[in-house]
Image (cartoon, rainbow, N blue to C red):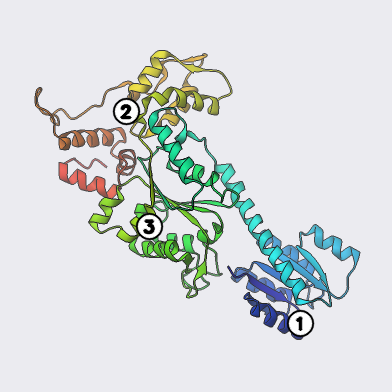
């Protein structure tokens, strides 16, 4: 990936010399003659490295410019050059986090070496900024805890697939822990020291998702006042996790296919492809093969994503893991030694958990707030946990008549809608289907739209 370099020097000959030499080396180079001009173009475009003379005309020196650039972009790397070296200036440059300090005259190979080091440092700083944000948002590794055969199978797949560079499609209902599986795949891969970037494709409007993923060029749309890198570029050398990939539009799907096939992206408004080295992990709680059959998801992209499938079972299929998960969540949320009573654990294991592990975590957090003693009884659990589903009286057939799958599905959807107070988005998430699919099923089964 070619570095973008900005040269700041009041001497036209030096600007021309550096511009020609660095362009021939494959860098993208711009040059200006003052600190003020440098700040103006820097705020409009994205640069990896700035090479600036210390003594430049105007109200700002190169050292002053260094401070302004670092405030605007902490990851930018600045190389100072001067014919007038002094200890005081060198100390000031170090204090302001200059990458290097070069004294004229110099050989172009010296600048090339420093640019290579600058790119390594920029990547490290960018990753640290991202990781600090990720650590602040990090949650408990709840999705892959458990000793059931089903979850052991998931962990075995992670161990087998993680060291490879294969694309993985993680499937499972909402709340089962798909992102945690993706994180485990990254952490156990050769890319563990690179960035792990997560994008929820269903939570970002289509108009913004393309720019978020692939970046954009200045002027490509209203508000695009500078070139901006996308998350694929941020993830270069690491892993990209595309959650809810089934929610992407056909236009986004075409660009994702290119990123997978050609290992390159094109920013919005751009024409020049940018090479990226990113391993893609994708997840969905909907049946992508059905979307392919419907024509709403590209078949070629589906096969590119589904190289290695990993399915996470719902919590109702691994109820033996519930006591272990409950104990973990208690220790994670509270420092005391409170425990569920045997009766409470039985109630937890008999519940269907439509919201899976995420719902269990929320229930335990609520129970800890409500309890006062050293044990948490069944009476401290939310009321709906211990109650059987309340189906519509007319929904099920007479006793002795086996219910059809359609009848069971109708009753279940109706119950989930009641639990969410008719909020269809929340109901769709619990059911593990798209909101559009829920609307179609409600129309098909004649369920009343209460909200």
The residue that label 2 is drawn on is: 352
Label 1 element class: helix
**x, y percent for residue 360:** 41, 29
Image height of 298 relative to 55, above or below: above
Q: Is residue 54 visible?
A: no
Measure how far apart labels 3 and 1 are at the Cα level. 49 Å
Label 2 element class: loop
Foreground mark, 3 or 2, reads 3
Image height of 308 relative to 216, above or below: above
Image height of 245 relative to 187, above or below: below
The residue that label 3 is drawn on is: 304
Label 3 close to label 1 by CB (< 8 Å): no
For this rendering, which residue is in front, 15 or 41? 15
The residue that label 1 is drawn on is: 14
In primary-sequence order, the first of circles 3 and 2 is 3
For this rendering, which residue is in front, 324 or 223? 324
Determine the residue positioned at 34% across, 41% down. Answer: 429
Foreground mark, 3 or 1, reads 3
Residue furthest toward the right? 87
């Amino acid at each position: 990936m070619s570095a973008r370099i900005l040269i700041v020097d009041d001497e036209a000959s030096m600007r021309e010399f550096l511009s020609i030499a660095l362009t021939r080396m494959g860098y993208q180079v711009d040059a200006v003659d003052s600190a003020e001009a440098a700040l103006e173009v820097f705020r409009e475009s994205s640069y990896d490295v700035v090479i600036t003379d210390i003594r430049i005309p105007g109200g700002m020196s190169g050292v002053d410019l260094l401070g302004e650039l670092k405030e605007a972009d902490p990851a930018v790397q600045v190389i100072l050059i001067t014919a007038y070296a002094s200890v005081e200036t060198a100390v000031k440059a170090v204090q302001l986090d200059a990458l290097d300090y070069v004294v004229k005259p110099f050989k172009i190979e010296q600048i090339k070496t420093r640019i290579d080091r600058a790119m390594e440092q920029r990547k490290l700083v960018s990753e640290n900024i991202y990781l600090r944000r990720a650590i602040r948002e990090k949650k408990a590794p709840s999705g892959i805890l458990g000793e059931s055969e089903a979850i052991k199978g998931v962990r075995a797949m992670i161990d087998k697939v993680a060291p490879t560079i294969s694309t993985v499609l993680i499937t499972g209902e909402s709340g089962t822990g798909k992102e945690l599986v993706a994180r485990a795949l990254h952490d156990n891969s050769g890319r563990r020291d690179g960035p792990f970037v997560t994008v929820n494709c269903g939570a970002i409007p289509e108009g913004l998702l393309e720019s978020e993923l692939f970046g954009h060029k200045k002027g490509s749309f209203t508000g695009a006042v500078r070139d901006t890198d996308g998350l694929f570029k941020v993830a270069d050398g690491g892993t990209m996790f595309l959650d809810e990939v089934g929610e992407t539009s056909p236009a986004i799907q075409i660009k994702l296919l290119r990123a997978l096939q050609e290992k390159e992206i094109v920013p919005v408004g751009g024409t020049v492809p940018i090479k990226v080295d990113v391993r893609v992990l994708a997840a969905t709680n909907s049946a992508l093969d059905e979307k392919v059959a419907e024509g709403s998801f590209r078949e070629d992209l589906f096969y590119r994503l589904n190289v290695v499938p990993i399915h996470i079972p719902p919590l109702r299929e691994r109820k033996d893991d519930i006591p272990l998960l409950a104990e973990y969540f208690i220790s994670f949320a509270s420092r005391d030694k409170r425990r569920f009573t045997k009766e409470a654990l039985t109630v937890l294991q008999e519940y269907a958990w439509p919201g899976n592990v995420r719902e269990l975590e929320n229930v335990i957090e609520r129970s800890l707030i409500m309890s006062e003693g050293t044990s948490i009884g069944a009476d401290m659990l939310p009321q709906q946990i211990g109650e059987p589903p309340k189906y519509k009286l007319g929904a099920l057939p007479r006793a002795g008549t086996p219910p059809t799958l359609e009848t069971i599905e109708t009753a279940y959807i109706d119950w989930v809608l009641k639990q969410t107070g008719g909020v269809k988005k929340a109901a769709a998430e619990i059911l593990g289907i798209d909101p559009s699919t829920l609307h179609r099923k409600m129309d098909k089964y004649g369920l009343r739209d209460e909200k």
